[in-house]
Image: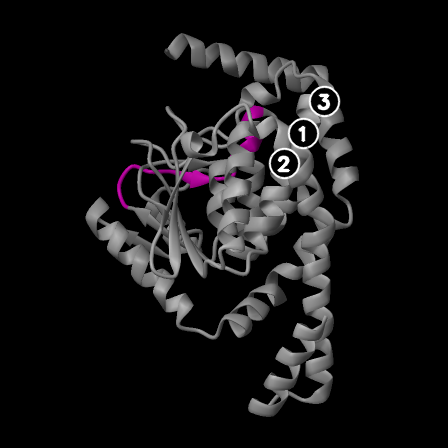
Amino acid sequence: MELVWIISLYYMATSWLSPFSILNFRTKMMSFASITRNNVLPVLRRSSQIQSTASLSSLVKLEEKQGYAVVSMQKPPVNSLSLEMIQALSQSLSELEKNKCKGIILTSACPGIFSAGLDIREMYQPTDERLSQFWSSLQTLWLQLYGSKMATVALINVSHAPAGGCLLAICCDSRIMLNGKSKIGLNETKLGIVAPSWFKDTFVNTIGVRQSERALQLGSLFNPEEALKIGLVDKLVPDMETATVVAEAELKEFLQIPAMARYLSKMKIREAALKGLAETREADLNQFVNFAKTDAVQKGLGLYLQSLAKKN
């Protein structure tokens, strides 16, 4: 509490902010801290037992550099977001924040894919407990990444980022994508699934209402040029070597801005969406569990898994 006032007094003394703005700043800081404390930390504690089934290092590779870190997903073959993978990413973010990391580059260590999105097997014929833990952990990861104080850059360095893979990318402050045959988008409707409100909010905040409305209904996947045109990605790069250089330069540009000013500016856009889930996450969880267990959804997921098995 005292730290918030110290920072507030510093801004009042060194900037043009009015006393009213400072009071508003203090209120927002307490609000954002409350979101993290009340909605992220308890779930991380409840998830600790499950995470023991898969080591953190085997699913997510952390490479800490000077002031920032590269977070690489490494769950072959497609970095599918299983319960354990989601929790590994969540714990990685917590570890980096604890170490006062200033920024991250989120990328993939698997050839050919950024992330194929949510692991469909988590939703097909699940136990109630597993399904609830899966969705609750995803809520936590989204709250952490979308509301992170760290500067975040998604480096889509190896092909596709559909569905949940796209969600991870648009949670970041900037997206760098390898040009070529890659695809990105929220294509849940193609599987008979409806993207929840917080997926939608993240999408709308990235590409606008009309583009989101059309893309969400059609389950659209965009190639790199299309994604750049609508603002789904920020920069395209021709090759892997260039991708890394551009991503590092992009992150450093964000880190040159005073951290508190950058973070609060981000929150002006994201605060409503974050509070929306933080205040309704139990209802959102119940809605997802009930929807996922319907006969129609289970039948659709089963057919999709059968089609994947035939391809393999």
Query: Looking at the rendering, in which quadrant would you find the N terminus?
Result: bottom right
Evaluate whether residue 202 shows in this view.
Answer: yes
| Of pointers 2 and 3, the one earlier in the residue sequence | 3
Residue placed under numbered mark 2 in the picture: 137
Please state if 251 lies on the left or on the right of 181 as rendered. right
Could you tell me which residue is drawn at 65 percent across and 46 percent down? 198
| CB within 8 Å, label 2 to label 3 | no
Mark 3 lies on a secondary structure that is: helix
Residue placed under numbered mark 3 in the picture: 129
Q: CA distance from mark 1 to mark 3?
A: 6 Å
Could you tell me which residue is drawn at 26 percent across and 41 percent down? 180
| CB within 8 Å, label 1 to label 3 | yes
Please state if 76 lies on the left or on the right of 45 as rendered. left
Q: Position of residue 284 (x, y in %)?
A: 74, 38
| CB within 8 Å, label 1 to label 2 | yes
Q: Position of residue 227 (x, y in %)?
A: 40, 49
Please state if 148 lies on the left or on the right of 158 as rendered. right
Q: Amino acid at mark 2?
A: Ser
Q: Quadrant of residue 116?
A: top left
Residue placed under numbered mark 1 in the picture: 133
Q: CA distance from mark 1 to mark 2?
A: 6 Å
* Part of the protein shown in magenta: 179-191
Q: CA distance from mark 2 to mark 3?
A: 12 Å
Is the residue 13 above or below the residue 203 in the image? below
Crowd around label 3: few <14 · some 14–19 · many ≥20 (10 Å): few
Q: Amino acid at mark 3?
A: Glu
Is the residue 146 above or below the residue 84 in the image? below
Q: Position of residue 114 (x, y in %)?
A: 38, 37
Q: How is the image coloured?
A: one colour
Q: Amino acid at mark 1?
A: Gln
